[in-house]
Structure formats: C-alpha cells, structure tokens
Image: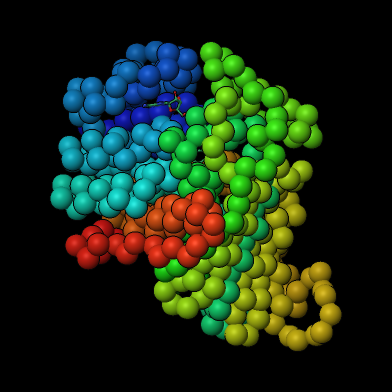
Amino acid sequence: MDKLRIGLVGMWGRGQLALWANRPEEGIRIVAGADPSPEAAEKFKGRLGAEIPVYQSHVEMFEKEKLDAVFICSPDFCHEEQACDALSRGISVYLEKPMALSPDGCDRILRTSLKSGAKIFLGHNMRYMSFVQKMKELIDSDAIGQVKAVWCRHFISYGGDAYFRDWHSERKNAVSMLLQKGAHDIDVIHWLAGSYTDTVTGMGGLTLYDACPRRSPSEKGISKFDASHWPPLEQSGFSPVIDIEDQNMILMRLENGVFCSYLQCHFTPDSCRNYTVIGTKGRIENYGDSGEELSIELWNKRRDHFRLHGDETIKIPMEAGGHGGSDEKIVKGFLDYLLLGKKPFTSPVASRYSVATGYCGAESIRNGGQAVRVPKLPKELENAV
Ligand SMILES: NC(=O)c1ccc[n+]([C@@H]2O[C@H](COP(=O)([O-])OP(=O)(O)OC[C@H]3O[C@@H](n4cnc5c(N)ncnc54)[C@H](O)[C@@H]3O)[C@@H](O)[C@H]2O)c1
C-alpha cells in the first residue's frame, strides 16, 4: 500500500527534480505524468518505466489517477491554473516558482488551498542552500546586530541561452525576469531582512538582446546552456518577440523599515548571486554561491580601508547534486511536510510577496521608475502559512 501517490505536470526540464521523490522502498511513488510534449513523455518513461501512464492534459491525469500530491514544473504561465485544478480536487502541490504571474493569481492559489485543505508548497530551493541558511543563521544569532540593509547583485552568464530564445522572452508568458529569476532573490532578501516589501521603484530595459539576430517564428525556440556562446552580441537564434528586460534594478522599502536593492543583468561573463547584509554591528557577504570556493565573510570591527576578507571567514563546503544540493533537500522538505507535518523553510505567503514585489517592480520600470505600493495579502489569507 503506497503512502504517497504522486503525479508530475511538466515532465522534463525542471520536472526531473521530482525524481528525488520517487522512493518505492518507502511507499512513495511517482505514478503518472502529464505534458503536451511527446519528447518529454519519452524521456520521462525512460527514467521511470515504459508502463507509467502519461497524459497530454493535467486535468485528465487528475481525473483518472488517484493522486495524493503533484509536482507542477511546467512553464510559469501554467502555474496558477494547474495549481488551482489540483488543490480544488484535494491534491497537495509542490509548485515551482514563480508562484503565479500576478499577486491576484497567487491569492487565488492560496484561497483554493485554504478552501480545500490541500497543502501548497513552493519550490524556493534557495532557502535550502547552505550558504543562504548560514547567512540566516548568522543574522538570527545577532552576529551583525539589527539588519538595516540587504543588497543583492545577480550576474547571469547564461541569460542569453536560457531566457531570450523561447517562451521566457515574452511578457505574456513570464511578465518579467523579476519574477522568473528575481522571485528567488526577492524571497531570500525578505527572509534575511525578516519582512516583506511595502514600496518598490525600479529602472531597467532591454539593452543588448534586441540587437542580436532572431530565429524565424516557424523555428522552435531552444534554450540550451552552452559556455561557448560568447560574447553575447555575436550570438544568434533569439526569439522573434522579446519584450522583457535584460537589465532589472529595483529598490525596495520593507514593512519593517529595512532598505534593499536587487540588480540583475543577463549578459555577464560569470554567474553568481552576491548578497550583502548590513546590520547595526557588522556586515556579511557571500563570495560565490556554488562550487568549491564558497565562503561568507563577516566584518564586525571598524577599519577605514577595504579588506577583501572579513574579520571571520566561514567556509561553506561544496555539496553534490542540483543547485548546490538544494534540490534533493527541498524535495525531502516537501515529503516531510506532507507525511510528518514538519514546517518547511519555504512559505506560500512569502512566495506570494516575492511575485507581488517583482510584479510591482516591473510596473515601476515600465512607468519611468515611479514608486509602486505592493498590494498587501488579503486578511482572509493570513492563515495560509
Ligand atoms: N527552482 C529552480 O531552481 C528552477 C530551475 C529551473 C526552472 N524552474 C521553474 O520550473 C518551471 C519549468 O521551467 P523549465 O525551464 O523546465 O521549462 P520548460 O520550457 O523546459 O518546460 C518544462 C516542461 O513543461 C512542459 N510543458 C509545457 N507546457 C506545458 C503544459 N501546458 N502543461 C504541462 N507541461 C507543459 C514542457 O514540455 C517541459 O517538459 C518554470 O516555472 C521555472 O521557473 C525552477
């Protein structure tokens, strides 16, 4: 008798994450998948067995299979509808970020979950990364005093490969890279600062990829990481329609008075998320976000010149597995939440605020940088955890 029967919507690409949940020896099994792509179905069967049922439509899978839970790893524009279709049938959901394409879409998901009692868990795997957890631990242990500012610089070397060749490049599918990529970082900023954004203002634009040769609308957009794709202006095959920005810079004032910034660029030679948190007694900063040379520097003594290393250097050991080992951990977090009621590091309300802030940040960028108030969570959804 299975403890958990799990379905997967969006079977390839990010969908491979769900394979960490397939643990037949523990009575936890992926029993079916749904995806409109025949290639995705073939690859999925290759990993889990030819006999596993595959559906073109997620609704058909929900109707025909008796599922306890589902991983939703389809493109961003599918999230709201597919999550609500699952939750309203009592199926608990692991939903990839961004939660939805608008604050209203997120609120609809939260409302559906509260109504049916089915659980909603968000795929913010950065909260399961060792360096992020260590930064949070240092802040909580008063290593830098009261947090007053959080700044994040986000360098994305693979932006041209991943986001400007297929569905990601259009606002109607992704809204802005402040949701698709920034939802992670805005969520981490909120977590480290202990509050949510109240007001956001931004600047940004499409500054490079609009100058690159495009594929024809009849050709399929392929997003494939390839480190030989350099320099960006010499690349080709980009989407016929690109209306998202390749630079996004937002400033945030949080409800608790902490000031924050998030700067994102999609054509850097290297890749890294670099956070610095400034408190009343010191500052921390991560050097690197994956690989062998990952550390957090802690400066807590005044000296009036630049120092590459802090008063303390905390080395973060390299971990195997996807996204610095966080993929396996977050899937375990989801299973523990369902089976043991263990509180996860992620929160659907926090996820909702990361979408709402990115959404309002994009609105500010597209309207001359005016300050935009982030809509508050409706009162009746406060218990959505
Ligand atoms: N947390 C992370 O680290 C992380 C990393 C990568 C992607 N993601 C998220 O995962 C999601 C998928 O991203 P991706 O890069 O794998 O996208 P993708 O375009 O590769 O699509 C993933 C799968 O969804 C399928 N699909 C397309 N339309 C569908 C539909 N209507 N119903 C069901 N399946 C459908 C595709 O055929 C494919 O198999 C996105 O929301 C993205 O933001 C998260």
Q: Give coordinates of residue 206: x percent, y percent.
A: 62, 42
**Residue 67 or residue 172, whichever sits in front:** 172
The answer to whether residue 269 is visible is yes
Residue at 47 percent across and 78 percent down: it is 257
Residue 291 percent coordinates (x, y) = 70, 48
Q: Quadrant of the N terminus?
A: top left
Q: Is residue 18 left or right of residue 248?
A: left
Tell whether 333 sits left or right of 339.
right
On screen, 284 above or below 152?
Answer: below
User: Can the viewer see residue 22 in this picture?
Assistant: no
| Picture layout, residue 86 above or below residue 199 | above
Colour setup of the view: rainbow
Above or below: residue 280 compared with residue 335: below
User: Whole-percent x and y of residue 201?
Assistant: 52, 63
Residue visible at 44% across and 35% down?
173
- Residue at 70% x, 55% y is 288
Which one is nearer the viewer's eye here, 122 or 43?
Answer: 122
Report the residue that reaches farthest toward the front: 368
Measuring from the top left, give residue 182's x and y in whole percent. 53, 51
Q: What is the quadrant of the C terminus in the image?
A: bottom left
Tell how many labels: 0
Nearer to us in this view, 71 or 306: 306
Q: Which residue shows up at 54% across the image and 37% down it?
A: 243
